[in-house]
Amino acid sequence: MRIPPIVPGTRPELATLEAGIVAERGRVSPLYQVLLNSPAIAQGWEQLLTAVRNRSSLQPDLREMVILRIAVLNRAPYEFDAHVPHALGAGVSPEKIEALRAQLLDASFSGLERSVLLLTDTMTRDIDVPESLFESVKAHFTDQAMIDLTVTIAAYNMVSRFLVALQIGH
């Protein structure tokens, strides 16, 4: 890690923040231990990512496929490995998980899943999303779900880029 982690329980001024992280996540992971170096950022990060993961209208299986795809595209194996159990719990098959790891969009994915993953690829690699791609995905979602999907893609690009830049999980 390029920034030293804060060991949970060693700074009394962070106790409330750490308790909130544990309440939402079950533990203070290495990612959050590094984020604790900036308490305001750690708090905002936790609120945003909790909303993305736990309070979104996006189907959990689609959310987890998006997260896994971003982790692979951004070379963030720590993130990929952290989300495999969540993906399995959301009903993503081991075959789909391995296809995502191998960057394959084969017939095991539905048309909707391929469209969502293509949007994920485009937002991650190219940033600009062609109108035709946006409209083809939007045809399957409410406005709220499109916001939730787009924010999920954007937020997990932030997560993976943070992890890679600071070499968390290496």
Image (cartoon, rainbow, N blue to C red):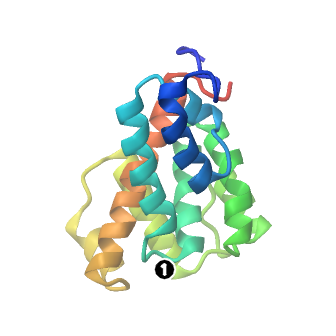
State the residue at coordinates (60%, 27%). 168
Q: Nearer the viewer, residue 44 or 69?
A: 44
State the residue at coordinates (51%, 49%). 70
Return the x and y of residue 78 as percentages of the image width and height.
66, 38
Q: Quadrant of the N terminus?
A: top right
Residue 36 seen in the figure: no
State the residue at coordinates (44%, 61%). 52
Secondary structure beneath label 1: helix
Residue 97 sits above or below residue 164 on the image: below
> Dividing the picture into quarters, in which one does residue 90 lie?
bottom right
Return the x and y of residue 3 as percentages of the image width and height.
53, 15
Residue 85 sits above or below residue 134 on the image: above
Residue wearing tag 1 = 112
State the residue at coordinates (52%, 60%). 66
Q: Residue furthest left?
A: 131
Residue 28 sits above or below residue 59 on the image: above
Return the x and y of residue 96 as percentages of the image width and height.
70, 66
Residue 23 seen in the figure: yes
Q: Residue furthest right?
A: 94
Return the x and y of residue 18 as percentages of the image width and height.
55, 39
Residue 74 sits above or below residue 129 on the image: above
> Dividing the picture into quarters, in which one does residue 38 lie?
top left
Q: Quadrant of the C terminus?
A: top right
